[in-house]
Image (cartoon, rainbow, N blue to C red):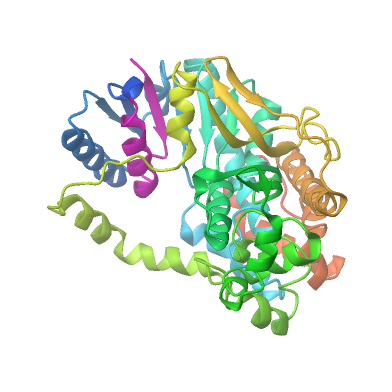
Amino acid sequence: MTKIAFIGAGSFGFTRNLVRDILTFPLLRDATLALMDIDAERLDFIKRAVDRIIAEGNYPAKVEVTMDRAEALKGADAVICTILAGGVQVWRHDIEIPAKYGVDINVGDSRGPAGIFRALRTIPVMLDIAHDIERYCPDAIFLNYTNPMAMLVRAIMRETDVLVTGLCHSVQGTAAMLARWIGAPIEEIDYLCAGLNHQAWYLKYEWNGKDAYPLIREAVKKPEIYNEEIVRNEMFLHLGYYVTESSGHNSEYNWWFRKRPDLIERYCTHGTGWNPGTHAYILKEYLKREKNWKNDIIKWLEDPKPLNLERGHEYAAYIINAYMGGEPFKFNGNVANKGLITNLPEDACVEVPVYVDRSGINPIHVGALPPQCAALNNITVASEEMAVEGCLTGDPTLVFQAIAYDPLTAAVLSLAEIKQMVNEMFEQNKDYLPTFKHFKV
């Protein structure tokens, strides 16, 4: 019987959907699901949701609920992490302080000043979880969904021996979007995608074995398709390869789109798919959820209609099934760069194709990225590596330097202005940064 531990199980939508997917596999239908969270109320809600899924699916699964992380991890075969270190009233300052200095952030969970300060708060917690995995379930596979993905996974790989990979739905989501644009069934699409989390590139995109990039170039000429993802379509038209993750995200990962109000209006305010590229979009959504999240959950729990228990497309369930001896599975995962992408730094966290089976995680050698793609990735890696080092050593100057090399920040501010901004962010976050002894650059 497989034991799967959910750390941060109170992430209601994520945990609910992952449990639904896991139990559809015959090998996992009798799994023990250990739900752990530090919020008792959220834990009670997700327990009720999982109980409902098990009952309606008539599964022989078992549920354990605990606020003790060690208890959840003992004997686990797989660990899924969906934590948030610090609530909305903590991380809102990651967005609001840079805004005072003219750095306009849309999401801010992955990189740049907001993503880096989220990493500084979250890396210590993630390392505590990883060290507990080493103690209580050293053979478990650790699947991380928490952002900032690359910096968290890099820290875990550097400081522990845990078998870890980071998971994001942007690769399969973008592949499906491109297939829709060219009228192709997704099952007839093959692709090679590699780079960094939220900044990986479709080096090949084929329909029934033929290069589909010419069809994509024709598709983006249509106004309705161009306007659906303006930032990414501009990047594609000028750089030649399509990038993962939404336009809202990508507009804050480079120099080109958010450095002036007129550019934000032209490229970012409209045409960013599910995420309007406006300032603080995700923060505003979370602030709304603070008011009604309980009502939404209760509505789902009390809905009399039968649940749709059909398997979704998130990677975690497929990976766990393969690791426990089921069908091998290929996915794009975040792993250490051990010669996988030859023009990105060794050991940096990269996102590449991976095969998983009972032997573990087996990443695929990609080779060199196109130089224009590697150039942007290398700037990102340099900033992330400095941020991780700064966090682990408690060096605020290195954190400042990491943010100084963030493309958007550098396009807007001088070094002196960046230092002032970073010092203000340190002052605001000092109660949440256990690896630092002093908080001024």
Q: Relative to 294, say whether 348 is above or below.
A: above
Residue lying at the far bottom in this picture: please name it. Answer: 262
Quadrant position of the N terminus in the picture: top left
Q: Position of residue 321 (x, y in %)?
A: 43, 24
Q: How many marks?
A: 0
Point 42% across, 40% down: residue: 8
Quadrant position of the C terminus in the picture: bottom right
Q: Position of residue 392 (x, y in %)?
A: 71, 37
Q: Relative to 322, say whether 24 is above or below.
A: below
Compared across the picture, whether 83 is left or right of 48 comes to right
Q: Position of residue 436 (x, y in %)?
A: 69, 43
Query: Does the magenta segment cover residue 210?
Result: no
In front of the other: 252 or 171: 171
Point 57% across, 54% down: residue: 174
Would residue 441 be seen by someone viewing this image from the given angle? no
In front of the other: 275 or 173: 173
Point 80% across, 66% down: residue: 238
Residue lying at the far left in this picture: please name it. Answer: 304
Query: Does the magenta segment cover residue 18?
Result: yes
Q: Quadrant of residue 115?
A: bottom right
The boundaries of the magenta stretch are 1-25
Q: Quadrant of residue 388?
A: top right
In front of the other: 106 or 101: 106
Would residue 148 be seen by someone viewing this image from the given angle? yes
Q: Position of residue 27 (x, y in %)?
A: 35, 20
